[in-house]
Image (tube, rainbow, N blue to C red):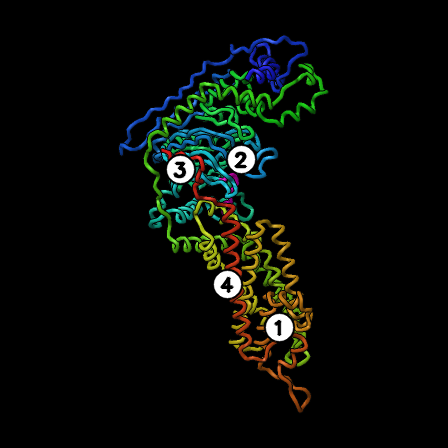
Amino acid sequence: MEEIQSQSENYRSSSSSASSPASRVPSSNFFYLRKPGALRQPISFEDSPEWETDADVRMEEGVDQDSINMATTPASPSLSKLNSGSLPSPPIPDTASSSVRKIAGACVVWKDLTVTIKGKRKYSDKVIKSSSGLALPGTMTVIMGPARSGKSTLLRAIAGRLHHSAKVYGEVFVNGTKSPMPYGSYGFVERETTLIGALTVREFLYYSALLQLPGFFCQKKNVVEDAIHAMSLTDYANKLIGGHCFMKGLPRGERRRVNIARELVMRPHVLFIDEPLYHLDSVSALLMMVTLKKLASTGCTLIFTLYQSSTEVFGLFDRICLLSNGNTLFFGETLACLQHFSNAGFPCPIMQSPSDHFLRAINTDFDRIIAMCKNWQDDHGDFSSVNMDTAVAIRTLEATYKQSADAAAVENMIVRLTEREGPLLKTKGRAGFGTRIAVLTWRSLLIMSREWNYYWLRLILYMGLTVCIGTVFSGLGHSLSSVVTRVAAVFVFVSFTSLLSIAGVPSLLKEVKVYASEESNMHSGALVFLLGQFLSSIPFLFLVSISSSLVFYFLIGLRDEFSLLMYFVLNFFMCLLVNEGLMLLVVSLWQHLFWSVLTLVSIHVVMMLSAGYFRIRNALPGPFWTYPVSYLAFHTYSIQGLLENEYLVTTFAVGQVRSISGYQAIRSAYDISLDNNAKWENLLVLLIMVIVYRVLVFLVLHLRVGKNASVLKFCRFEHGDKSSSSR
């Protein structure tokens, strides 16, 4: 400790000048400048306010005589006490608690939490190192720190949502017990979640409630209205999230509110939010935090991460956990954190945001700025004389906190909160399997009908392409000389329409991202998503197939029989279903627009080359093109079935004496079978491909997307298991 104090004395002397009345210029305080030859003087706290930190916890008897009811911490005092130039914290509406339904919060405690992820850090695999803290009902606990400090990792470790590759040591208590938080008892809001732009806010939340909650449909409307009111979304309830045509969608701040409202549908006891102010401007950030403060006043326990905040937003926090490179530099009341920095020799300068001051002191990226400015000089001092070392500041703050009364108070509170077990959080149940399939099917139908680039654009492209092909190959007649040209028309129709289906990749990518977001909170499942997406796509694909087939069939002049026409429609419909499964498989694998489109184009080109038109399949090179590519290309079976449907029972006259069968006329242009049931066998192969591709998509969603998006089992902490057995 003495070595650290001696190393950081230069920093302290420069910081002390920031708290003196003679140096209240913000520009000089930012870099903690010190004039060459300035006298070193002890740190002065004459401008610091009188800090009052109350770490007592009152244990009260609840209604059930077994619950742990923690006295909620009053709202943090206005930061106008810190300096006369700052604005006061925004007031919370008086009607907040009366207008929003009360929520029974839960007490969350984490003790000696250590997270190890191999390869995550350059010099150490420990992302979080022995972190301890707590969150009480009706309060907002914020985890702050610079980039790559472990904020999100700590949040996920507390919520039990870390990746399976992470190893967690320590203990997490919920109401004094180490039991996992069941489904519906907590909500987790990711930093970036995908919303459905084709739905209104009320529709989106209503479908989310149908997916999450059991019971009848009509009973969930009140829950949705409560969530809308809790997040102050009443004015936007009937507006489309993503806009429509040239209409703008919701602003970024309201989108974040919708993300949080989706989790409030379950009325969770604890709400975890990763960066609630992510990509928000100052006004939207302040409105968001006021809304969350109002939500916390209903009794919910809020734990969230934050990179930086304004002075007004900082005044709304109840407790702060400050991290740097996985180390806990402070945990306690927000104003006590400012006192902690002063005690360590880094008082917050006048008219500077506390969060800016914290990050300035512990963010190693500022050392790069100092290094770049070493040779610069200005009127306020010499940059080359600045000997600020962030590593020294971090060690000083960490050592000061470990020996402070704040750390002892936190340890005392943790002991008192964990020595008595409270009620276990109970699951609220979830919607049934059939209900979720019906909800996802209906929701997907609504999305597909509103999204013009989902199927309507493809229908327009198909109709345009079909008209072009039909006019190019029109007037062929039914002579022997028209066979080769008609084979080319069928090949172009099947191949090019399948290639144009790639226009639906962006919409499928949105579907997969929505699934990943919902799967992370157990709102959906791979099988439920697949069945819902498949059932909802059938009407649109059939509409596309029958409209395109009718135009092509009569423009080309195929045989005028109803049964043959229906087979043509059914064959093309199966071809579209197979292609839809292929696109969904590629999109699920990549989850990236560019690579998905590139992969699909490459696959379609290879399949077109091996489909048997450019060269008959029997004449293709065996090692690759015949086996397995030509047998994996759905183009082959679709074209074979269509040609067998048209030519298998037809004959062509050769002169006036003899005639040849359709098989003999076409075998030099395309390879078909003599069996009368061959076209149905090809249709059966297409149906099997439809099923196989869906099974592959299910495996990818279950093993890749779902595995990365949701690790929902509560982490079993090694130290926690040992300690619980000893207890």
* Numbered badge on residue 691: 4
What's under tag 3, amino acid-wise?
A: His
Asked if residue 196 is among those painted magenta in the image, a careful observer would answer yes
State the CA–CA distance, disc 3 to disc 1: 59 Å
Above or below, 302 relative to 199:
above
* Quarter of the rendering occupied by the C terminus: top left
The residue carrying pointer 2 sits among few (fewer than 14), some (14 to 19) or many (20 or more) residues within 10 Å by Cα, namely: some
Residue stretch in magenta = 190-197
State the CA–CA distance, disc 4 to disc 3: 44 Å
Residue at image point 60% right, 73% down: 640
Name the magenta segment's main secondary structure.
loop
Find residue 8 and report its horizontal and vertical position in percent: 59, 17
Find residue 578 and report its horizontal and vertical position in percent: 55, 63
State the CA–CA distance, disc 1 to disc 4: 31 Å
**Looking at the image, is mark 4 or mark 3 earlier in the sequence?**
3
Which residue is at the far right?
375
